[in-house]
Image (tube, grey):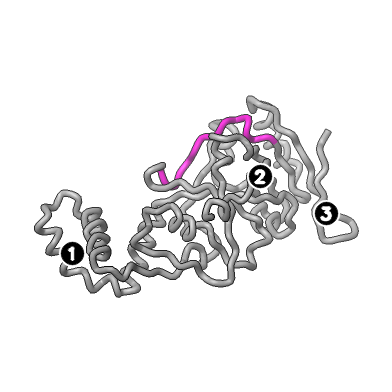
Amino acid sequence: MMLRNIRPYTPNRLFKYRSMNSMGIVDLFLSYEVYFSKVRDFDDPFESRPMLKIHDAKEEQIEYLVKITKEVFPNENPNIIRILVESQKHRLYDNKFLRNVYDNFIDRNGIYCLSENNNDIILWSLYSNSHKGFCLEFNSSIENTLFYEALKVNYTEMYPIVNMMNMNNVEEVQKALLTKYKKWSNQDEWRIIKTEIEGGDGLYKFKPELLIGIIFGALMEEKDKITLIKYIKHYPTPIKLYQAQLNEKTYQIDIAPIT
């Protein structure tokens, strides 16, 4: 059930809104890399702030404390670990302590955000320098490639509830990192998550042929278009070009191919 919720279908295309000042433009075109950010770098302060809980069973609580204590003191002998755990049991009921442990865990993940939409007015305004930037189009339909890993964001009214003692379970991590307030639902967002084991935040390579299109913003300056076209001319695989335009009658963006 969880898998159906986070990947109810496979989108053929996913889009990334960018400005000319965005991090990693050179890496994108010359090294075929995209940058995965930490959650704390996002623009929404409500991101990844679920309600936290723990198991009621005392045995499981002790196991959890042993685990996180060993992470801090990996070379300590078992007797000292037991003493430390005994002295820390009360902290499981300290919300500030749990929040700090949770924040440290989440901070070790990297996230790349994408959208199903290439013509959302608000997204163009927020992430493409008020329509002066551009939008990347990636093929997300090919198995065992980077963008195929994307998972759908869930939009809700209430915070999800995450069990701190199950943070090694993919379902808990996904609840924490794939839930946003429902008023953001216009973004139709998908996310690729890289855990600490996979490398966390930083640059990740993709196959060049997965970048299949670029949309120039409706208000993009000519000099910026020329800069991108120079990169595109030296790109190893074909990239289709499109021009976004402000519709003359309604509040919408029209996108036309550049021939």
Where is the C terminus found, in terms of image quarters? Answer: top right
Q: Residues within 10 Å of mark 2 (few under 14, many from 20)?
A: some
User: Residue placed farthest to the left in the image?
Assistant: 79
**Residues in magenta?**
199-212
Q: Which mark is residue 85?
A: 1
The local secondary structure at tag 1 comes to helix
> What residue is rendered at 60% in x and 48% in y?
21
Mark 3: amino acid: Leu
The local secondary structure at tag 3 comes to strand
Q: Which residue is mark 3?
A: 246
Q: Residues within 10 Å of mark 1 (few under 14, many from 20)?
A: many
Kindly report which numbered mark, 3 or 2, lies closer to the viewer in this rendering.
2
Q: Residues within 10 Å of mark 3 (few under 14, many from 20)?
A: some
> What residue is rendered at 23% in x and 55% in y?
72
User: Residue placed farthest to the right in the image?
Assistant: 249
Mark 1: amino acid: Val
Q: Earlier in the sequence, mark 3 or mark 2?
A: 2
Q: Which residue is mark 2?
A: 11
Looking at the picture, how far across and down is residue 128, in whole percent?
67, 52
Looking at the picture, how far across and down is residue 73, in whole percent?
19, 54
> What residue is rendered at 36% in x and 59% in y?
166
Looking at the picture, how far across and down is residue 78, in whole percent?
12, 54
The local secondary structure at tag 2 comes to loop
Q: Earlier in the sequence, mark 2 or mark 1?
A: 2
Disc 1 and disc 3: Cα gap in Å? Answer: 61 Å
